[in-house]
């Protein structure tokens, strides 16, 4: 994959995922990168609102309904140098449950976009669509807040991603006889011998060692970056250690806390104005932290 694809996801609504997507896109465009932000919160698209775009001619609806042949035809100029937007679809009933073939077509066209960086703003939660879009990215940002409920949902989301990834892997490597182990592992209370990913893969290796060895490599390469948003204290900033420990202990995943973003009253002020905080208050605490995040994403 020549371009950088950054997927931004949150385990639940209200963690500031879309606000981060918009402002990170602006920060990356500001350092000279050609950026395309794609609103993949299907059925709940809002990036255009956060960017202050009140009207637009095209959206993903046009691509899905085959009114256009390519995503380039629905690119929206944002008025910000180096930054374009693909507005999410919202007028097609049940668009959030996109059929597999349609989803694969969309993914292929996303990967063909002419840009340095593509930012995917995904829906909240862990539906199959969200997981599948997440898996095409070469950088994955999991946005959470310091509350324990948000952290636990972030862990559950990543676990769902791993199980989805392994299910697809074993299905496509002639190792479907391993899938029963994955199903049993979804209930660790009834199957305590499958409590950790190490336990699961050890059992799988007894059935299909070659495919399991490849699965271990997949998991080793799946390194989500945790982003703690709305922090108010040093203690808040350090809660990422909790989810890091859980991911390592139970899933064998080594994640990193890429950054923390502070609670900043300028974010709410900018949102009420339907403008990005990076434009309303470029020297605010939040904006400075987002510019730092942009450099880490390069």
Image (cartoon, rainbow, N blue to C red):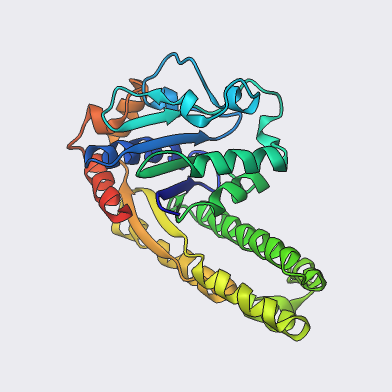
Q: Quick one: 11 or 83, which is closer to the camera?
A: 83
Which quadrant of the figure has residue 274?
top left
Where in the figure is residue 82, as x and y percent of width and height?
29, 33
User: Is residue 246 shown to the viewer in this render?
Assistant: no
* Residue reaching furthest to the bottom: 206
As drawn, 215 above or below 287: below
Q: Is residue 172 left or right of residue 216?
A: right
Which quadrant of the figure has residue 37?
top left
Residue under the point 68% across and 81% down: 210
Where in the figure is residue 65, as x and y percent of width and height?
65, 23
Q: Is residue 114 left or right of residue 252?
A: left
Q: Quick one: 69 or 35, which is closer to the camera?
A: 69
Residue under the point 69% across and 76% down: 211
Where in the figure is residue 28, as x and y percent of width and height?
28, 42
Q: Quick one: 6 or 156, which is closer to the camera?
A: 6
As drawn, 106 above or below 236: above
């Amino acid at each position: 994959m020549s371009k950088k694809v950054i997927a931004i996801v949150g385990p639940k609504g209200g963690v500031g995922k879309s606000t981060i997507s918009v402002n990170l896109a602006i920060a990356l465009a500001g350092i000279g990168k050609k950026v395309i932000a794609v609103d993949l919160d299907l059925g709940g698209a809002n990036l255009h609102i956060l960017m202050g775009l009140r009207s637009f001619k095209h959206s993903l609806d046009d691509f899905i309904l085959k009114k256009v042949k390519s995503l380039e035809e629905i690119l929206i100029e944002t008025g910000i140098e180096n930054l374009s937007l693909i507005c999410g679809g919202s007028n097609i009933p049940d668009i959030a449950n996109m059929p597999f073939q349609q989803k694969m077509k969309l993914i292929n066209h996303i990967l063909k976009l002419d840009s340095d960086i593509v930012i995917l703003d995904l829906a909240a939660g862990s539906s199959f669509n969200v997981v599948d879009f997440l898996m095409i990215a070469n950088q994955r940002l999991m946005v959470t807040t310091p509350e324990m409920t948000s952290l636990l949902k972030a862990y559950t989301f990543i676990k769902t991603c791993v199980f989805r990834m392994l299910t697809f892997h074993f299905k496509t490597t002639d190792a479907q006889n391993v899938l029963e182990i994955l199903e049993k592992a979804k209930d660790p209370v009834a199957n305590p011998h499958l409590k950790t990913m190490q336990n699961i893969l050890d059992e799988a290796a007894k059935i299909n060692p070659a495919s399991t060895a490849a699965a271990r490599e997949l998991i080793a390469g799946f390194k989500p970056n945790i982003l703690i948003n709305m922090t108010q204290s040093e203690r808040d900033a350090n809660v990422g250690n909790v989810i890091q420990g859980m991911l390592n202990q139970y899933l064998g995943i080594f994640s990193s806390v890429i950054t923390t973003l502070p609670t900043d009253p300028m974010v709410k002020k900018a949102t009420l104005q339907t403008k990005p905080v990076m434009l309303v208050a470029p020297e605010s605490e939040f904006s400075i932290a987002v510019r730092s995040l942009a450099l880490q994403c390069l």
